Amino acid sequence: METISQLLIEETRYRLLEESIPRLKKCLARMTADDIWYRANHQTVSAGNLVLHLCGNVKQWLISGLGGRADHRDRDKEFQEEGPLETPVLVQMLDDLSSEINQILNELDDVDLQRNQTIQGYQVTGVSILVHVVEHFSYHVGQVTYMVKSRKAVDMGYYQGKDLNQLNRS
């Protein structure tokens, strides 16, 4: 039987590598460079900024925080970029991030998930880090999805072939 730690690690892997990152790449494929770097006003950021931000966040929290790698994040720069970085560059960044995520998740154990540490000034455990990274990534993928749907009038088909109206059965 798998431990709670193993289950959490595998769920994190699924949510990031099988769900969120593929959705983000699907969004990028539906957008032009102008769409990717469009800002509705000075209070908003572009989809491109959110890709950079997500890469920075995951590297700081998961790759550095849990994986022990050096932290070189420049968070402000993620939002200052005006692009256009070409779509293949953003997709490659996500592919590279996927590899790093998978490597770190393969290295984790119960001790890592229970260890206390400080990230961005927050006192967190490894469990907190995994929950934060999944929640934060999903939140911003939802924002990018909204950008695509509102600018392109398309259904992203995330649930194609699934009957979401099924009732729970005991």
Image: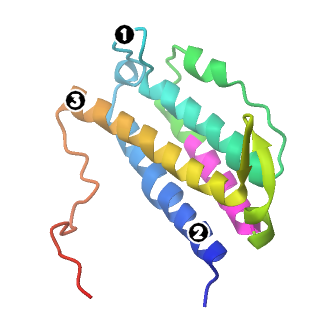
Q: How far apart are marks 3 and 2 (CA)?
A: 34 Å
The residue wearing badge 1 is 41
Name the side, left or right, on which 122 lies relative to 134: right
- Residue 89 can be seen, yes or no: no
Question: The residue under label 3 is which amino acid type?
Answer: Ser
114 over 7 or under it: above or below: above
Start-end of magenta stretch: 94-108
What secondary structure is found at the residue carrying circle 1?
loop
User: Label 3: which residue?
Assistant: 150
Q: Which amino acid does label 2 sit on?
A: Leu
Q: Which residue lies furthest to the top in this view?
A: 42
Give how far across and how far down residue 121 sits, in percent: 74, 34
Q: Earlier in the sequence, mark 2 or mark 1?
A: 2
Q: Which residue lies furthest to the front in this view?
A: 123
* Cβ atoms under marks 2 and 1 closer than 8 Å: no
From the image, state whether disc 2 or disc 1 is nearer to you.
2
* Cα–Cα gap, marks 1 and 3: 15 Å
- Check if mark 3's residue and mark 2's residue have beta carbons within 8 Å: no
Dot 2 corresponds to which residue? 8
Q: Do the residues labelled 1 and 3 touch (CB within 8 Å)?
A: no
**In the drawing, does residue 71 fall left or right of residue 99?**
right
- Between discs 3 and 2, the one toward the N terminus: 2
Residue in view at x 61 percent, y 85 percent: 2
Q: Quadrant of residue 44?
A: top left
